[in-house]
């Protein structure tokens, strides 16, 4: 049925009747079209690889090697990106520490030189900023821990593993 309450037959139900009314040569074409196979992946379908190998010896191995090399390259690039993100985070922490300590030392120096209101304001501002950052990072860490674990990378239909079929 095509819709709820609709008694009209579906295309699959009509197919045998339609094929029986066609000339035999057309019926074979219709059957082939409905029997078409879909395949998606980083490498061609095994049948296509076999045909390529028959035309150009060694081509199937070259295609498989290229797919392997591309996969390795992608993993290497992901590793570089992760390492760069970690490095950026560490660098940001160091710069934040240096700035915070500069403000704290400057504020203490101002207080020691008799500029207590300005020094105290700078010290309070620095401490509030550090405490706020600490609370924010703790909440962010707790939220990240409460998210259920998911695979690092989910395959898209175009990137399905070799040999899989849709």
Image: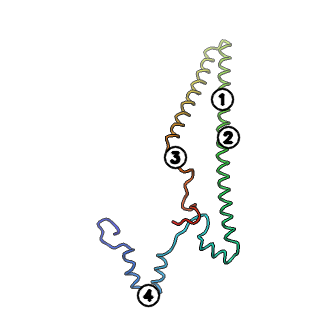
- Per the rendering, the mark at residue 149 is 3
Q: What is the CA distance from the residue labelled 2 to the residue labelled 1?
A: 15 Å
Nearest the eye: 52 or 3: 52
Q: Please report the residue visible at 52 percent of the width from the left and 34 percent of the height from the top.
A: 139
Secondary structure at numbered mark 4 = loop
Q: Nearer the viewer, mark 2 or mark 4?
A: 2
Q: CA distance from mark 2 to mark 4?
A: 70 Å
Q: Residue at x 67, y 75 (%)?
A: 53
**Which callout, 4 or 3, points at the residue further toward the start of the chain?**
4
Q: Is residue 15 left or right of residue 80?
A: left
* First in sequence: mark 2 vs mark 4: 4
Classify 10 Å Cα crowding around label 4: few (below 14), some (14-19), many (20 and above).
few
Q: Disc 2 designates what residue? A: 87
> Label 2 near label 3: C-beta < 8 Å?
no
Q: In the displayed structure, would residue 93 be above or below residue 66?
A: above
Residue appearing at x 66%, y 61% in the figure: 68
**Label 4 with label 3: CB-CB less than 8 Å:** no
Horizontal and vertical percent for residue 65?
68, 64
Distance Cα–Cα, label 1 vs label 4: 83 Å
Quarter of the image where the N terminus is located: bottom left
Spatial CA span between label 1 and label 3? 32 Å
Q: In the picture provided, is 142 more to the left or to the right than 21?
A: right
Q: Give the residue at mark 1.
A: 97
Find the distance from the CA under tag 4 to the CA under tag 3. 57 Å
Say which label, 1 or 4, has the lower sequence index: 4
Residue 50: image quadrant is bottom right
Which mark is nearer the camera, 4 or 3?
3
Q: Is residue 17 left or right of residue 55?
A: left
């Amino acid at each position: 049925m095509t819709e709820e309450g609709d008694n009209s037959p579906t295309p699959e139900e009509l197919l045998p009747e339609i094929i029986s009314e066609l000339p035999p040569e057309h019926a074979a074409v219709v059957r082939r079209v409905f029997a078409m196979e879909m395949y998606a992946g980083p490498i061609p379908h095994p049948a296509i690889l076999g045909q390529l190998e028959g035309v150009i010896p060694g081509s199937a191995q070259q295609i498989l090697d290229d797919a392997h090399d591309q996969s390795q390259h992608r993993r290497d690039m992901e590793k570089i990106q992760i390492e760069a993100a970690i490095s950026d985070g560490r660098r940001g922490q160091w710069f934040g520490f240096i700035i915070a300590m500069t403000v704290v030392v400057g504020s203490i120096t101002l207080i020691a030189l008799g500029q207590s209101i300005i020094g105290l304001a700078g010290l309070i501002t620095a401490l509030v900023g550090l405490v706020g950052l600490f609370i924010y990072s703790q909440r962010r860490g707790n939220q990240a821990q409460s998210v259920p674990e998911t695979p690092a990378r989910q395959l898209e239909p175009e990137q399905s593993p070799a040999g899989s079929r849709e």
